[in-house]
Image (spheres, rainbow, N blue to C red):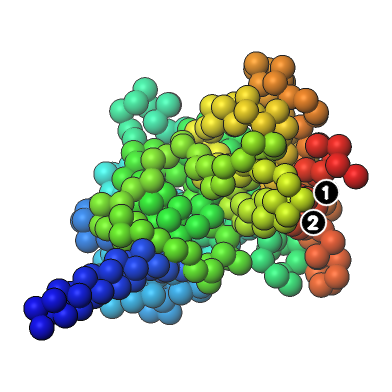
Amino acid sequence: MALRKCGNLFVARLAGQTSRAASTMTVRDALNQAMDEEIKRDDRVFLLGEEVAQYDGAYKISKGLWKKHGDKRIIDTPITEMGFAGIAVGAAFAGLRPICEFMTFNFSMQAIDQIINSAAKTYYMSAGRVPVPIVFRGPNGAAAGVAAQHSQDYSAWYAHCPGLKVLTPYSAEDAKGLLKAAIRDDNPVVFLENEILYGQSFTVSDEVLSDDFVVPIGKAKIERSGDHVTIVSYSRGVEFALEAAKQLESIGVSAEVINLRSLRPFDFESIRQSVHKTHHLVSVETGWPFAGIGAEIAAQVMESDVFDQLDAPLLRVTGVDVPMPYAHSLEQAALPTTEHVVKAVKKSLNIQ
């Protein structure tokens, strides 16, 4: 009897460990949890934006937060991006830590003067006397069927500007850990999410579920180790890179996949170390090619010792250099796919 009880106890504990190891979380829930935890942790943190409170957010990222934290911490705004972004920046000047949500970063164009001229430059222009601890967050890049004015990728736009930190999460782990780090940072942070990824579930560890979990800003993550080629991407592009790596494995190609996580600051050292091993490099992004993130990676490669390590030119996989079409077939043709990544890797490795 005692032996049976011990056996049952062991099985129960093993089952519990398996359950914990197999915990999953959507990107949507990860973002919600991050804001909830930081609002509870710091009474200076608050969320404002269109429909974030009573409607629970246009994409339900802030679901339940208004009922839990009330009108002073979760604030619905009128449809005026320049107005509420300005209010948020002013609140940051005064010592609060606002999270300013744009329903889509396409609408941040209405507030770009506040983001660049007020938020990004004030710490420098005040000789370090006025920090601006603010997070601008929302969906970025192409979704589905929303045409040219709602499909732009602002990664390179904002990464171009000194004074901003620019984060681009891929997984639930990225979303929670990076958002918490952004809220705690004393600098303005542009936090570029992806609408297509909101509903995707990812396996997360107990550490990710902890209130104390934070991902360091400026450090890339090796999503998959490999020896033959380095594939560098961020946000939804990481999904294409990982799918391509899986397909390439079937033909004997070992691809290393780097998830940048952060575009500013930029972890070029992780790319350098990987290329010293693989000697081939492919970048993947969903935005336009001209002056994009892949172009910046290429420039830094040319200007460093990494260039001497390459056995083939760096190849870029990007979106097509046109405004996003509305027709479904043309929209698909304007965006990169897993097949494009596989084709680029084969070209780099001279595989027919």
Nearer to us in this view, 110 or 144? 144
Looking at the picture, how far across and down is residue 239, in whole percent?
Answer: 63, 57
Q: Quadrant of residue 14?
A: bottom left
Question: Label 2 belongs to which residue?
Answer: 339
**Tags 2 and 1 touching, CB below 8 Å:** yes
Q: Is residue 305 visible?
A: yes
Whole-angstrom CA distance, mark 2 to mark 1, is: 6 Å
Looking at the picture, how far across and down is residue 5, in whole percent?
Answer: 14, 79
CA neighbours of label 2 inside 10 A, class few (<14), some (14 to 19), many (20+): some
Looking at the picture, how far across and down is residue 347, in whole percent?
Answer: 85, 40
Rendered residue at 81%/65% (across/down): 331
Q: Is residue 158 visible?
A: no
Q: Quadrant of residue 194?
A: bottom right
**Residue 164, above or below 22:** above
Tell me the kind of residue under disc 1.
Lys
Question: Label 1 belongs to which residue?
Answer: 343
